[in-house]
Image: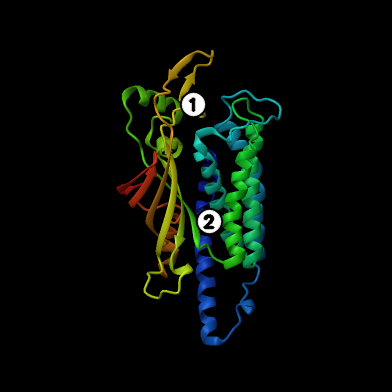
Amino acid sequence: MKKGLLHIFFFLPFIVLAQNTSFLRRTREESKHFNAIDSADVKTPINRKRLYLISGIHVAGYPGTMYLLSEAWYQDFPRTTFHTFNDAKEWLQVDKVGHAWTAYNIAKYSKGMWLWAGIDDKKAAWLGSFSSLGYQTILEILDAHSTEWGWSWSDMGANVMGIGTYLSQEITWKEQRVQFKFSTHRNRYAPDLNTRANALYGNTLPARLLKDYNGQTYWLSMNLKSFTIAGNLPPWLNISVGYGAKGLFGGFENIGLDKSGNMIFNRPDIKRERQWYIAPDIDFTKIKTNKKLVRSAFSFLNMLKMPAPALELSGGKIKGRLLVF
């Protein structure tokens, strides 16, 4: 997930395109009620210049991403031949959910780019999904040639699940009634644990927010009005289920070794626990506005879970939380 976030930032400049196109599509669909036009007849013509541009961006993005990641992420680790690595039980699977979240959101925003080029809705959803799979596969290929990691079938499975969550909704409902979201906060650790966290996750605020699995929560946020005929519910009101973990100071166990294999951290007394949440949320895409900048901001915010009160289940106990990030 950490490396996959670089792909999300790559797509951010095109959020405006995605949202503007989505707005135009909604406007046309709404007009059919007044003009008795079947939605199948409402089509956006393909813009060849935009199509070539978006195709070029995607094609160039694959080798470009491999080069940038190879230099920025993998250069400190020796290269090796293709090999696999079974990390299915690592980090209590928080990283796997992160892979799914990244794949989901890349598919969503890639589709927006194809829509901007005039591709019809269904084809754009498929193209966005294949684009996401391609980018995520690049990561695994790079991992497979690094001694630090390896090709992970569980990572690829999580990628497919994220893309499937997106594509299945596009095919079934032509909208995302269940959004895949992310929230994070910086934990404050005791001095000895903070030293270990610095080594694992970095010591800057951005690094901790993006890398510290103890502070991350992933959410499936369901839009209530999309699943009910109750007319008095706000169209933006969601209910979300979240997953996170705590006590993670090592991939499989809370131990750490130096480059020579000597034990430098050993805390089996720290319990590694899964955390489950249920909390209200906001679907910003259901808030109508004609302002392009606001739509773009709403689209970005919809990747993130808004802080809210929540119920938490962890360690076999349920407790209320005033605010969960």
Distance of mark 2 from mark 1, alpha carbons? 40 Å
Q: Is residue 271 left or right of residue 11?
A: left
Say few, some or many: other residues with alpha carbon within 10 Å of mark 1 (under 14 / 14 to 19 / 20 or more). some
> Reading the chain from its start, which is encountered first: label 2 or label 1?
2
Q: Examine the rendered structure and indicate whether residue 221 appears above or below residue 31.
A: above
* Extreme-bottom residue of the structure: 35
* Extreme-right residue of the structure: 81
Q: Is residue 79 something that shows in the picture?
A: yes
Say few, some or many: other residues with alpha carbon within 10 Å of mark 2 (under 14 / 14 to 19 / 20 or more). some
Quick one: SS at disc 2? Answer: helix
Residue 109's image quarter?
Answer: bottom right
> In the image, which disc is placed on residue 253?
1
Q: Is residue 13 left or right of residue 315?
A: right
* Residue at x 48%, y 27% (from the top left corner): 250
* Extreme-front residue of the structure: 316
Q: Position of residue 8 (x, y in %)?
A: 52, 48
Quick one: SS at disc 1? Answer: loop
Residue 73's image quarter?
Answer: top right
Identify residue type, mark 2. Answer: Phe
Q: Position of residue 5 (x, y in %)?
A: 51, 43
Residue marked by disc 2 = 14
Q: Position of residue 76 (x, y in %)?
A: 56, 24
* Residue at x 59%, y 84% (from the top left corner): 37
Q: 20 or 189, which is in the foreground?
A: 189
* Residue at x 31%, y 26% (from the top left corner): 190
Q: Examine the rendered structure and indicate whether residue 4 appears above or below residue 298.
A: above
